[in-house]
Amino acid sequence: MTETLESLFEPIRARIAAATDEDELRKIERETLDKGGTVAALLAAIPSLPGPKRPLAGKRANELKNAIGAALAEARERLARLAMERERTGAGFDPTLPGARISRGGLHPLVAVTRELEDLFTSMGYVVLDGPEIETDYHNFEALNIPRDHPARDMQDTFRLDLEGKLVLRTHTSAVQARGLKRLADEIRAGRFAPPFRAIVPGKVFRQETTDASHEHTFHQMEGLVVGKDVSVGHLIGAMKTLLRGVFGREIEIRLRPGYFPFVEPGFELDARCPFCKEGCSVCKRSTWIELLPCGLVHPNVLQECGIDPEHWSGFAFGLGLSRLVMLRYGIDDVRLLLSGDLRFLEQF
Ligand code: PHE
C-alpha cells in the first residue's frame, strides 16, 4: 500500500508541476481530491484490507491528500507570481496586434456634392449666396413675377406661416434671386460693383406635399444666377455643360425643351443624356434623357422689380435639383433617405 501511494503521487505531482493555468489545476483537483476522486477511492478500499494494515493505509491516504493539496497550493502561487511578473515586464504584450477600431464620421452626400459644386462654380467666378429659409411672400413669389392671384402659385404647394400670408417656408432657392438682384442694384447704383455678376445659392427648400420615394417636403436645390451685358441662352448652355462635366467627369449631351416659369423668359427644361445607359434604363425611365434642371433668361419684369434696368442688363438663371442630382450620382432610389438621419444609410458614404 505504501508503494502504491508513492507511485500514485508521482504522476499527479508531475501533472501539477506542468500545469500552466488554473483550469488545468482545477481539473486535477477534481480528479484527485473531490468526491469520487483518487483519494476517496483509496479511503473506500481500506475496510477490505487485513486489520493490522488499516491504520497505516489510512495514514498514507491522508498524507497523499495533504501532499496533493500542498502541491496544488504551491502551483497556484507559482501561476500568480508568473502573471504578476508578466504584467510588470510587459511580456506577452503584442504591440503589432491591430488596435480597437475608431469609427469616424464622413460628409453627408448632400454636403459632399454641394462642396464640389461650390468649388466648381467659384473657380468660374461665381459667389456663393445664402438666404433665409423662412421667407417673405414677396421674395418667394411677388418679386419673381408671380402675383397673388397668379395660377403659377399652384405649381408649388406652399407652407404658410401666418394668416396674413406674408411669411412662407421658401418653396425654391429662386427667392434668393430677388434678394441678390436687389443687392446688386444697390451696388451698381453706388458705383461699387459692375456686372458680370455670378452667384449660386445652394440650400434647403420646402413644399407641402405627400411624401413618397421621389417626393419629400424638405429637399435641396442650387440656384444659379448670372447678370451681365448681352447674357444669352448660349451663355446659359455653356454654363450648364460645364456644370455637368464637373458632376459626371465627362462631356454630357443636353437638350432644351420649352418650360414655363414666370420669372424667366424664355424658360426651358434642360435634359441631360442619361449617364448610366445607351438604350434606356430605369433611371431615365427608358427614354435615355433625364430631366435635370429648369432654367431660362431672367424675366425683364424681375430685373425691373429689383431695380436693375432690363434695357442695359440681361441674365440667366437655373434651378438645379440638388437632392435629385445626389440621388443620380450615388444611385439612391428613395429621396426620403437623404434627410432620414439613418446611420445604416449614412455609413455607406
Ligand atoms: N425655382 C424653380 C423651381 O423650383 C426652378 C427654376 C429656377 C426655374 C431658375 C427657372 C430658373 O421650380
Image: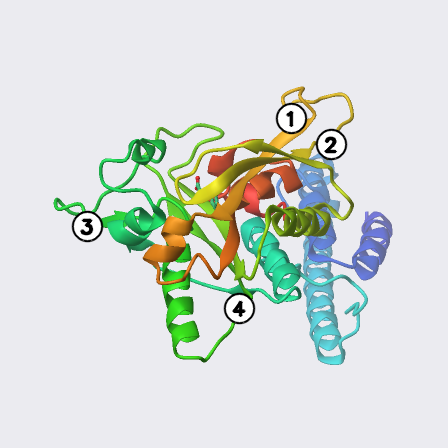
Q: Is mark 3 within 8 Å of ligand 1?
A: no
Residue 163's place in the image compared with 114, above or below, is above
- Separation of marks 2 and 4 at Cα, in angstroms: 38 Å
Residue 42's place in the image compared with 64, above or below, is above
Residue shown at 58% from the left, 49% from the top: 109
Q: Secondary structure at mark 1?
A: loop
Q: Earlier in the sequence, mark 2 or mark 4?
A: 4
The residue tagged 3 is 166
Q: Earlier in the sequence, mark 4 or mark 3?
A: 3
Residue 217 in percent (x, y) is at 37, 38
Discs 3/2, front: 3
Mark 1 closeness class: few <14, some 14–19, many ≥20 residues within 10 Å:
some
Q: Amino acid at mark 2?
A: Phe
The residue tagged 2 is 276
- Separation of marks 2 and 1 at Cα, in angstroms: 8 Å
Residue 348 in percent (x, y) is at 63, 45
Q: Is residue 197 left or right of residue 236?
A: left
**Marker disc for residue 195:** 4
Q: Secondary structure at mark 4?
A: loop
Q: Amino acid at mark 1?
A: Cys
Nearer the observer, 2 or 54:
2
Residue shown at 43% from the left, 56% from the top: 310
- Separation of marks 1 and 3 at Cα, in angstroms: 39 Å
- Separation of marks 3 and 2 at Cα, in angstroms: 44 Å
Residue 226 in percent (x, y) is at 53, 58
**Marker disc for residue 284:** 1
